[in-house]
Image (cartoon, rainbow, N blue to C red):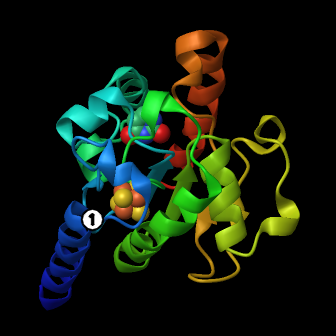
Amino acid sequence: MEILKNRDDKLKEIKEEVLKCQKCLLYKSRNYPVIGEGNHKTKIMFIGEAPGAQEDKTGRPFCGAAGKILDELLKSVNIKRENVYISNILKCKPPNNRDPQKEEIEACCSYLERQIKIIKPEIICPLGRYSMQFLMEKFGLENEIEPIGKIHGKVFKTKTVLPGIFLIPLYHPATVTYNLNMKEILKKDFKILEKFKY
Ligand code: URA
Ligand code: SF4
């Protein structure tokens, strides 16, 4: 119980820091930062890129169109959203949904790193290629980076920071909104999470 309390407190500290954060210019245009939410004792973390318009309005990750697809994918493998933890690399929305910039990722990524170290999941699923690239580099898998089309759904084992965690790159759920075929591919990839008997 003591450990659990500690974990909650440490995540709350991050939340308070992010609410005041001005480490990159995105703080100027954001409405609400999106810190992350879910089970602090989870075995699975999903890491997206950055908040979109809907997330910026509510402060909640994956609550718009991509979130609906993520919910459907979780349901397809009987995983409850409240049993996982969902966060992003960037905590503030980039203007006009543009791609995250290198300096923004550098400024923001320590929050995510701390979240991962506090939660210590067994499985990390990067959603989309930015998250995949960032997390594979972070965890000592830089030599195994290939296009997401080639390594989505593949299971890697982290080598540094927190060694021994399974890292499974997945396509970003938003890809389904412009290519319906992606849903079946994502569903197939999600099946691997069932094998971990979460
Ligand atoms: N896309 C993301 O990468 N993250 C969100 O929270 C929402 C959409
Ligand atoms: Fe701070 Fe990250 Fe928001 Fe930039 S994106 S202001 S680094 S919380």
Q: Residue 77: percent from the left, percent from the top?
A: 44, 34
Q: Is residue 37 left or right of residue 75?
A: left
The answer as to whether callout 1 falls within 8 Å of ligand 2 is yes
Q: Nearer the viewer, residue 83 or 14?
A: 14
Residue at the spot 66% in from the left edge and 24% down from the top edge = 185
Q: Residue 56: percent from the left, percent from the top?
A: 28, 37
Q: Nearer the viewer, residue 88 or 96?
A: 96
Looking at the rendered structure, the number of numbered marks drawn on it comes to 1
Residue at the spot 58% in from the left edge and 71% down from the top edge = 165
Q: Identify the residue position indicated by label 1 in the image.
A: 18
Residue at the spot 63% in from the left edge and 62% down from the top edge = 135
Task: Give the answer, above or below, for where 100 lies relative to 133.
Answer: above
Tag 1: residue type?
Val
Q: Is residue 123 left or right of residue 189?
A: left
* Residue 82 visible: yes
Tell which quarter ligand 1 is in.
top left
| Quadrant housing residue 119 | bottom left
Task: Give the answer, above or below, for where 100 lies relative to 176.
Answer: below
